[in-house]
Image: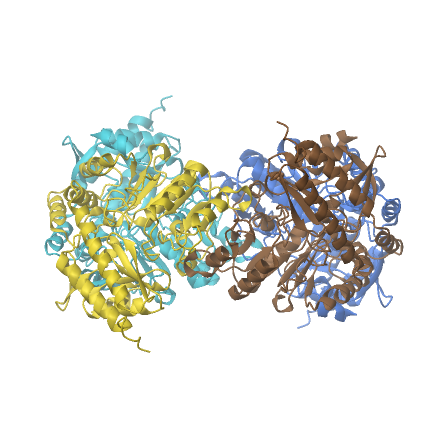
Chain colours: A blue, B brown, C yellow, D cyan
Amino acid sequence: MIDIFSKHESQVRSYCRSFPAVFVSARGSRMTDATGRTYIDLLSGAGALNYGHNNPAIVEVVADYLAGGGIVHSLDLHTQAKADFIECFQEVILQPRGLSYKLQFPGPTGTNAIEAAVKLARKATGRVNVVAFTNAYHGMTLGSLGLTANLAKRKAAGVPSIGAVFMPYDGFLGDIDTMAVIRAMLRSDGSGVEAPAAIILELVQGEGGLNVASTVWLRRLAALAAKLGALLIVDDVQAGNGRTGSFFSFEGTGVTPDVVVLSKSLSGFGAPFSLVLIRPEHDVWKPGEHNGTFRGNNLAFVGATKALNTYWRDTALSSAVCRKAEVVSRRLKRIANAIQPGLARPKGRGLFQGLEFSRGDDARLIAASLYVAGIMIETCGPDNRVLKLLPALTIDDQDLDLALDHIEDEVIKLLGRADLPLSA
Amino acid sequence: MIDIFSKHESQVRSYCRSFPAVFVSARGSRMTDATGRTYIDLLSGAGALNYGHNNPAIVEVVADYLAGGGIVHSLDLHTQAKADFIECFQEVILQPRGLSYKLQFPGPTGTNAIEAAVKLARKATGRVNVVAFTNAYHGMTLGSLGLTANLAKRKAAGVPSIGAVFMPYDGFLGDIDTMAVIRAMLRSDGSGVEAPAAIILELVQGEGGLNVASTVWLRRLAALAAKLGALLIVDDVQAGNGRTGSFFSFEGTGVTPDVVVLSKSLSGFGAPFSLVLIRPEHDVWKPGEHNGTFRGNNLAFVGATKALNTYWRDTALSSAVCRKAEVVSRRLKRIANAIQPGLARPKGRGLFQGLEFSRGDDARLIAASLYVAGIMIETCGPDNRVLKLLPALTIDDQDLDLALDHIEDEVIKLLGRADLPLSA
Amino acid sequence: MIDIFSKHESQVRSYCRSFPAVFVSARGSRMTDATGRTYIDLLSGAGALNYGHNNPAIVEVVADYLAGGGIVHSLDLHTQAKADFIECFQEVILQPRGLSYKLQFPGPTGTNAIEAAVKLARKATGRVNVVAFTNAYHGMTLGSLGLTANLAKRKAAGVPSIGAVFMPYDGFLGDIDTMAVIRAMLRSDGSGVEAPAAIILELVQGEGGLNVASTVWLRRLAALAAKLGALLIVDDVQAGNGRTGSFFSFEGTGVTPDVVVLSKSLSGFGAPFSLVLIRPEHDVWKPGEHNGTFRGNNLAFVGATKALNTYWRDTALSSAVCRKAEVVSRRLKRIANAIQPGLARPKGRGLFQGLEFSRGDDARLIAASLYVAGIMIETCGPDNRVLKLLPALTIDDQDLDLALDHIEDEVIKLLGRADLPLSA
Amino acid sequence: MIDIFSKHESQVRSYCRSFPAVFVSARGSRMTDATGRTYIDLLSGAGALNYGHNNPAIVEVVADYLAGGGIVHSLDLHTQAKADFIECFQEVILQPRGLSYKLQFPGPTGTNAIEAAVKLARKATGRVNVVAFTNAYHGMTLGSLGLTANLAKRKAAGVPSIGAVFMPYDGFLGDIDTMAVIRAMLRSDGSGVEAPAAIILELVQGEGGLNVASTVWLRRLAALAAKLGALLIVDDVQAGNGRTGSFFSFEGTGVTPDVVVLSKSLSGFGAPFSLVLIRPEHDVWKPGEHNGTFRGNNLAFVGATKALNTYWRDTALSSAVCRKAEVVSRRLKRIANAIQPGLARPKGRGLFQGLEFSRGDDARLIAASLYVAGIMIETCGPDNRVLKLLPALTIDDQDLDLALDHIEDEVIKLLGRADLPLSA
């Protein structure tokens, strides 16, 4: 059956090259292929399945909605499902956190929401420049791509970008204080860098290698943005929806972004959905100035409402994520210590962690072996040196342990024990 | 309840300003609001609901798939649902039409697919310029927006576009042969216009005012593209999926585009989905060079497969569309003739027709009255002068007649009978 | 000695490849090479030597100024020489023609002046787009190059241009009314072309092939620019300074441009000099916003003042140009008629005329033979099909006749007499 | 007479606002105004008059050349004057320094030469990005302006720049090693900054505030450029022609740029002239790919040849510059020490030095007082905080001392003696 894909689908396909099975069903953290084999899924749809595949509570309400003749597609018309989602988001997410945002529903993908956020920032400030960071990834449509640091991907645009300026992310310059560099480049009249419309970042860089922005650094960045009159945009497409333990990645930092972008896991069951949160004073859109056919994906509204009600009215999920994150963290440290020093180091936070390998192909080789062993896991970062663990937040402890055991085995198999000489 | 929207949703919302009811359910061409009132829907989700709301055959298989634990989200992994769709698309759509295309599944929105198509054309040709047409609309992300003629929308980008060149669409210059102009501007070395990577168009301009490209003109354009070594991209996002009577809008023209973009109604039930069809020789993508989290929307695969099997294995739908198109056409002519000459003229083809009014606000006023009368219909074109009928292809004859009766009534109410003097 | 050039000078050199002699002196329309051979110069420094080489009256005052210790270089400081020029320009050129312009002295090259004019137009209007024409040539620095239609030259920029839109020049579309096309593309909201900051053109396209804008067309263009709120910029770098018979090329058309750019022959003796004339209401520059080290070239001021005083206080030169233009015109017609019909047609106006050949290499071959015969003449237009006569305005009648005789001989030698069959 | 300028000249004029006299003659370092008053000129035409005004030896040969009927204007034809210059430049400048460059003569301004250099780098590498530095100034035409750090000047372009990336110049980040930052941003795949076509810099930033690149830093930069495959372009427009003591600013550093740009003082007497030096392997121009009407300014060739023969065949001028630079350096230190600590610090090298004041308006106030005292001097750097001494290299010691005495007086007058409390 794989012939169907190689024969008829474009060369652009990628994940299926690393994980070539044909999958037929999935539940929670397990996927099953056409031969009946099951895999533990540490991809989670690149972060789109934080509540696991086919989360029963969520899927049930979606199926009921469909069965009841609920509207599926509605452009941006008022629907009951949308009203319910908006109310729930206010009540469960924004109000308890003291946040005040207007909600924009753009086309239901992360990149579309990023484009909307950046357009809005340019419109609100009358400026052109947008500051993005080293190793940033924000999407593949032209506007987002211009803010994506990966040059191979950006080159595919075929046109140079306008108004994107890259600054070093926290830690990118080793011992050098990146914020001092950023300030000098953005605040000095003679720097050559125009005052930006926005500064956009992920608090944990998902594709960029699980680099983490420290709270202190983020606060300095937010203060700088405020001084410059630039909007601070947090891209929480991958880091949001509980991935770091809290619903938003910036909770607890004291920083309130001007704009927040959510997508991926927001619908609760993997349906396309995205959301731009805009501080009311920046909601300068004219009617219809950014639109899209699928901006009213009611199945996503229904699923998202259920997900919020199920997982974010109390702290059970958050606590579980923190507990599991602790497990992952401990195990990754143990693995790093089990092999020759310097070969691997743990990165990330929450259930958004990984191991960065210092040698070129190690991460990829390990991911390949793990697939053979029944664990689906991807790599990220420049040169794909980071093995990236992105389990469902709801993964059960046994599966998580099992996956970590396999990872430990494969790492040690490839790189040897710390107490043994490295194989040539 | 409308307060929820005005209080919490961004100013950007648009359709709900013209149609402010809160909708709770829908079926076929009828939508029902929270007060129990029903409306005849001539919007059809801006063309995303060609098979009507909640088409029972389609929704049923989607619900069954969900109930059966079928994979919902899969990035671009191989899934059974995707294999089934690809096979079905080959068998039902491409092979019978003698077409050979590779399928690319980008992020599931029209604009994302347009961005992919344009990137690919630039990559395949090594050129920058893309020719778009007057009154073109291709989407709201930066790359697509650069190809969109509406200046208010494009201005919202906040940055000038690179590499977009606008040429007059068939009929745009009145009596002047637009193709002679286009040829001179694209083929002469001294014209100042660089050889394009692609020429992109809709065969019926959906947002641009229901302008129709004639077959002769299209053939000349395709021949020109071939001579220039430019890819001909047909944006069939709104005009495809049977809207003009045939599955693709270009069937019967003798022209085979290099790239075709589909979206909107493709899933069959309004779920986000898009597809780029690429002639095999142009499939120069490297793995992962254009990706997106939701490019494997399996509910859409399942719905689309069912829609193709139900409606495109025989000619029943096509014939029905042609028959209804004839009805619409006849009625619109009658309406235009019923009022003062020159005030309105019919446009479009298939179930993609409308009335262009020569005076500024007529179309909007009529649409507003129609909403009061229970008919949902939108306007399009520069200054929104075109009343645009976009019924479900599956609308039953009574509803279509009823809608047309209402339209006739409202037009005559506003503009008077041809045999009576126009009210001051 | 030619070795010096081929060994040490960049490959970029061009004229010297067609005219490889080493020149040592020049006077009027005659150049003398190192072997003592003289040539009749129909290049006139690409229009920079309208008063001939080393015009004695002009060179004398320049030499006197130098000898007297007059300031040579002065940035934009006030100097006596500059004051004299400004007064003279007012008195001799602007006032008699009822023109009111502010004078800007940018860096002393045509392209620098074009850049200044375009920057000013963008600043004055707050718009980005600039409309240039097919076959336009405005210079080689990045801003001017973006407005230059020649694609080979423009490609050398290495970056796509922003904000340049090309429209068909008068006659470019054969029988089609180019102004109808331009209007439709610039005035319709749905055309996709943003309202321009400026429309820039030469009234006779010097590099572009001696295409002439008719007065009626120019008036319609000026009216359109006014309606659009765009500045009309006339590039009189090559067509000004008397080349068409009047000082400015637009005299007698009834059109007063918003901005006029002069350079080339302005200094009177071939010294670098340029001038931007700005309608007072558009002089929105801030101090120093466009500058340049050599914007106060006092030798050029001195030469220019002398040239104006000598040639533009009465109509003698104008009359002589018109008389000689008539001679050229008559002879070119005779030549065209002497050969097979359709092979050549006269173009241009004033002493800015030429012959366009329908076959690819004819113009170049003829120019090459003429060089052998002692006539220096260049080609222009797409594919260099136009033999371009650019004699000094002060050329004496014998030299002009002699040159025309040679041209006639060479054309007939290559293309045969009209009454004889064309050689295979 | 000043009315002539305010009435008829554009608002863009700038130097004449600070130095409003009307100048009539000049010689060496002295300018004389219409009232007979003389000034010591420390502007030197913004570096265009390194050999003083009307240097007698140079002016004499230029006058003789004119008198002898030598060709003034020649496009890029071979002329004796050009051959002489090329030979002289080889013999006097390049060969003794072991340098091998092809010579390109673009339009005769610094900005035109920068544009040529940057175009060539893009063409030679097939890349778009060009790295410029904080506080860089490279000219006012669009390509150069994009590489100019001053935002007010750049904003006047009216269009965003493409392909310019600004990096911190040596010292810009205080204690932070700028080269470490630059390396990280240019060499890491994940940095988001595309590999550059060129890195362009001045070794002493003339407009940017007399910042000096250290030799060690320059070497590291050159090594980085080589590793990146980027061309190293040294803009020696202001820093070359002996300004720093050696002919080129990079002599003695061990670095050989790929491209060097010269202009300003090159002609020897202030005539427009510029030159691009290209390592032979990078001379990938096609004939005529960058041209310009005034690229054969023979008066400049003649003057330049004389200047080279007079001043660069021995080390007398170099030694004198070093000696005078030492004087300036000592005096500026003394002045800085004479006032309150921290108020002023000396900067620059060679006869390219100045005093940076820590408080906003000090430099401008001092320059204004100096003008009253008969000293013409300008300010530079962000906020114009640097008083910039740019005497002719040939200034005699008395004038230099006199000027320095005046500077000392005015500084102390405004800022008080170090041993006295600062006036409130």
Image-based side of B55 in relation to D151, left or right: right
Q: Is residue A213 visible?
A: no
Image-based side of D184 in relation to A250, left or right: left
Depth order, front residue of B114/C68: B114
Check the picture and name the quadrant holding the N terminus of chain D: top left
A204 over D84 or under it: above or below: above
Image-based side of D282 in relation to D178, left or right: left
Q: Position of residue C179 (x, y in %)?
A: 43, 47
Q: Tally the marks.
A: 0
> Outermost residue toward the front?
B419
Depth order, front residue of D396/B196: B196
Check the picture and name the quadrant holding the C terminus of chain D: top left
Depth order, front residue of B159/A38: B159
> Outermost residue toward the top?
D424
Q: Position of residue B110 (x, y in %)?
A: 67, 52
Q: Position of residue B297 (x, y in %)?
A: 76, 55
> Outermost residue toward the bottom?
C424
C231 over A400 or under it: above or below: above
Q: Is residue D213 visible?
A: yes
Depth order, front residue of D60/B352: B352
Residue C25, quarter of picture: bottom left
Residue C4, quarter of picture: bottom left
Q: Position of residue B375 (x, y in %)?
A: 76, 38
